[in-house]
Image (cartoon, rainbow, N blue to C red):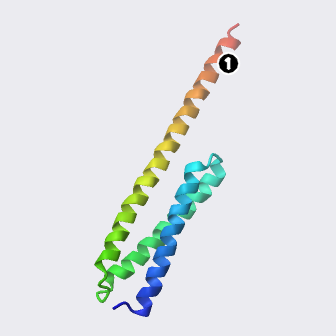
């Protein structure tokens, strides 16, 4: 039996989880660094809120919906994989940017030696 308080927590957790997915999808497609930074901060806030909601459900001994908690664990793992993909993509872009900058510096050096 789910209490009213548990239903509110579940609804809030479901909403927060959907927001996390949405932010991660936006992060995959953003090239603007400022907007990227804002989205990362928003994702951090959402993840912290999600963790607090999960903690509240887990510590409530009267909450007996094991299946729901297992789905949340699967969702957590899925969000982690998506976040790592975004992180790896950003690392690649940064590395590529540094490589391009080095190439530009080499061409400038060659041009200045003439």
Q: Position of residue 77 (x, y in %)?
A: 36, 60
Residue wearing tag 1? 108
Quarter location, residue 94: top right
Q: Quadrant of the N terminus?
A: bottom left
- Is 99 drawn above or below residue 19 in the view shown? above
- Residue shown at 61%/18% (left/top)? 106
- Is 92 drawn above or below residue 51 in the view shown? above
Q: Position of residue 99 (x, y in %)?
A: 55, 28
Q: Quadrant of the C terminus?
A: top right
- Is 74 drawn above or below residue 97 in the view shown? below
Apparent side of residue 75 relative to residue 109 in the rendered image (left or right) = left
CA neighbours of label 1 inside 10 A, class few (<14), some (14 to 19), many (20+): few
Pick whichever, 70 or 111, lies toward us: 70
- Residue shown at 65%/48% (left/top)? 32
- Is 63 drawn above or below residue 71 in the view shown? below
Q: Secondary structure at mark 1?
A: helix
Pick whichever, 108 or 63, lies toward us: 63
Apparent side of residue 82 relative to residue 35 in the rendered image (left or right) = left
């Amino acid at each position: 039996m789910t209490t009213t308080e548990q239903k509110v927590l579940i609804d809030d957790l479901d909403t927060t989880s959907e927001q996390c997915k949405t932010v991660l999808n936006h992060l995959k497609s953003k090239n603007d660094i400022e907007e990227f930074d804002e989205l990362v901060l928003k994702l951090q806030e959402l993840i912290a809120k999600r963790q607090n909601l999960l903690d509240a459900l887990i510590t409530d001994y009267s909450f007996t919906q094991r299946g729901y908690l297992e789905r949340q664990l699967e969702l957590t793992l899925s969000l982690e994989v998506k976040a790592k993909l975004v992180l790896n993509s950003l690392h690649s872009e940064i590395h590529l940017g540094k490589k391009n900058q080095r190439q530009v510096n080499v061409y400038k050096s060659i041009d200045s030696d003439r």
